[in-house]
Image (cartoon, rainbow, N blue to C red):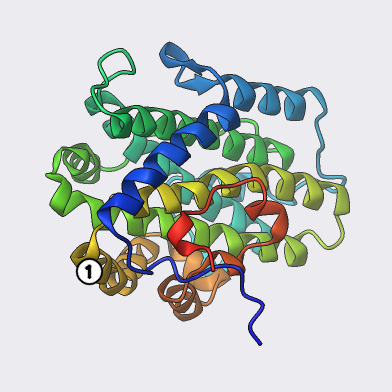
Amino acid sequence: MSTAKYRSIFTPSTEQQRQENFDDYWLFTQQHGGELFEEDRDLLKKRARLQYFQDNPVRLRTPLANPESFYRNYVTMVDDPKSLDRMTLMLTGIYKFARHEWVGIKGAWDYAPSMADARTLQDKISRVHLAEEFCHVRLFDEMLKTCGLDKVEWVPLSPWKEKVYEIFPKLPSFILDAPAFVTELMGVTFYCHLDKLFDDVFADEPEVRERLKALLDEITIDEAAHVGQRRNFVGSIGIKVSKWLVKPFYTMFFDDIPEVGLLFDIKQMIKDGEEFDFNQLPARIVEHSWVPSYCKA
């Protein structure tokens, strides 16, 4: 007898179900993040949580053996990535993943209507969603500081990649919705594998390991809810397209971050994406996140 609580994220849904879930998600997000500070691209509860981490810092007991190796490679890989130690490789990979997120949300934030100009519930949801993503970049920055890396700069991507991220949010919804959903799913997949990697890389640094997991949990809780929220935009045809897009999107994105192929099993990550349901996530994540009603068993 199956004890699974959740169905596949690719489970079919009706338009009425999705509309009801937009209403439910809006209630969730108001309680979850608190007041939106639009000028700061921040949220009340998220700001307070980051302040807690900053007021109670945790740092490596044994500093990185060669911080310059990180700084030399964190924007662009200059050295042979196989020559980097595992911790440095992981940290440069985290930065590059978060940097893509940062560039993407900058373009979307500038294009999306402000809360005052939002005409639909979906517009309001998207504005809060983007503010949460800016909060994630601050949490990633705190991860790097936890590992003694306090000179990190968030720099633009190449001009053509910046242009792609600028154009992406301007696409019609029937083109945008499926890829946007898959990118959120890819984030959750990456975070789940990263959480397991922390156990390995920081086996001798338990305090840092637990702090990094706590920071990552803050991000993953939001991102899991974003998977459900973006799924709500996708209809019956789009969800079939989305499942087909998992492999090429994961492959293309992770090929741009050489560290990922050395740290993780990309084939398994693709499989996890194609088979995703919320049963894959730890209870501590799901109980604080949001799941569409049509994905509940």
Quick check: 146 above or below 174?
above
Residue beneath disc 1: 241
Q: Residue at x 29, y 30 (%)?
A: 123
Indicate the quadrant containing the N terminus: top left, top right, bottom left or bottom right. Answer: bottom right
Looking at the image, residue 232 sits to the left or right of residue 195; the answer is: left
- For the C terminus, the image quarter is bottom right
- Describe residue 268's horizontal placement relative to residue 198 as left or right: left
Q: Residue at x 53, y 31 (%)?
A: 135
- Quadrant in the rendering for residue 110: top left
Q: Nearer the viewer, residue 193 or 116?
A: 116
Q: Along the horizontal axis of the image, is 152 left or right of 196? A: left
Q: Which residue is at 69% across, 50% downward?
A: 66
Decide: is 258 above or below 210.
below
Q: x and y percent of residue 206 in the render?
A: 87, 54
Look at label 1 and name its amino acid.
Answer: Val
Total of numbered circles in the picture? 1
> Badge 1 local density, few (<14 within 10 Å), some, or many (20+)?
some
Q: Nearer the viewer, residue 15 or 44?
A: 15
**Most extreme residue toward the front, as rendered?**
16
Q: Is residue 78 at least partly visible in the picture?
A: no
Residue 185 place in picture, x, y as percent: 43, 59
Residue at 45 percent across and 71 percent down: it is 8
Query: Going by the image, does 3 lie left or right of 92?
Result: right
**Residue 196 visible somewhere in the drawing:** yes
- Residue placed furthest toward the bottom: 1
* Residue 212 screen position, x and y as percent: 72, 47
**Coordinates of residue 43 in the picture (x, y in percent):** 54, 22
The residue tagged with tag 1: helix, strand or loop? helix
